[in-house]
Amino acid sequence: MVKFAMLSAWHVHAPDYAREINQHPETRIALVWDSDPVRGEAFARELGVPFEPELEKVLNNEEIDAVCVNTPTTMHREVIIAAARAGKHIFTEKVLATTIEDAYAIAKEVNQAGVKFVISYPHRAQPHNLFAKQIVEQGLLGDVNLLRIRNAHNGTSAGWLPPHFYSLEECGGGAMMDLGAHGMYLAAWLLGKPKRISATFTHLTGKEVEDNAVAVIEFENGATAINETSFLSAHSPFSLELYGTEGSLLIGGPNRQVQLRSNLLKGEVEGWVQPAELPPSLPSALQQLVGAVLRDEPIHFNIDDAVVLTELMDGAYRSHKLRRQIMFPLT
């Protein structure tokens, strides 16, 4: 049995992670901590567990095996490093940090502590995106030259995002930092090491953080990725498009259709095809952590992947702020 401490109810997905932990037969929530006592006490009451106002006491509690980090993004360095030094296994909501310096500092402590670590990258666990990875690795598109990802919702325009998601001090950014993270980690997973990035953000609703954003990334293999995101888009289904010298792969639309056309399948299949079977889903990030802690099972979204996302995100925000392209690696 893995006993978790919920570290904050700040993030909108904190209740979802709590529900997943409570429903898992090998885990349970033992207590809650939050930098905001009112919020933390309310969350603890909902979960029927004690609230502990002092983080140090939580991390010194020998009954706690792991932590579920849902704090403001800008608190991640402080909280995750403290958890690692206390020997607690770590699940965290993305992104790891808002700057590459903080990401490196966190990674150093996690690696030195030898604790299990996983970050929430749900799109990398989904069958249609696993199929995209498979197609790229099999070379069915030839040399991939363009990736386009759109991941957006209407959280701001429809008014359902919590007010603190517009705090630059707490979030470090807006639509790109939150929703755009999925496109960032998918692009790096599919295309490899980034070479340069250019980003444009807008503040159409006058919030402190951006509500509409696009980043264009060139990778070392010559491919370009376009990562689009927004808090202002009603009825905007996820889409992923991959284009190469020998074919194209289209994923998305209302039904998340998967369509492939490849010159390398001539004689076998002609025209656009829909795969009869997609790869099975990977376990969720929390399931991966539990399996790793109890049975040393593999973790697919590890600390190295977390650092890669932060580097891309840091580069995007530098680009927008400085109004120029940013080269990798960041210095």
Image (tube, helix red, strand yellow):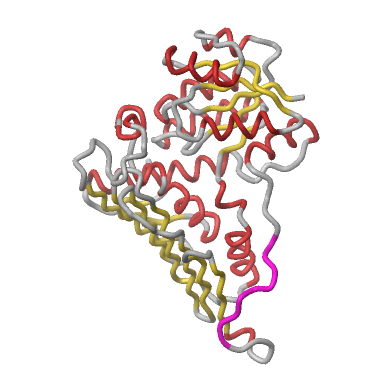
Image point (80%, 35%), residue name = 295
Left or right side of 12 for 91: right
Residue 212 image point, x, y percent: 29, 50
**Residue projecting furthest to the right:** 295
Q: In which quarter of the view is residue 331 placed? A: top left
Residue 273 magenta-drawn? yes
Image point (76%, 31%), residue name = 25
Q: In which quarter of the view is residue 165 placed? A: top left
> In the rendered structure, which segment of residues is drawn in magenta?
271-279
Residue 301 magenta-drawn? no
Residue 271 image point, x, y percent: 57, 87
Pick the quarter of the image with the N terminus.
top right
Residue 98 image point, x, y percent: 39, 35
Left or right side of 127 for 82: left
Closer-to-camera residue (327/45): 45
- Compared with 37, 328 (above or below) is below
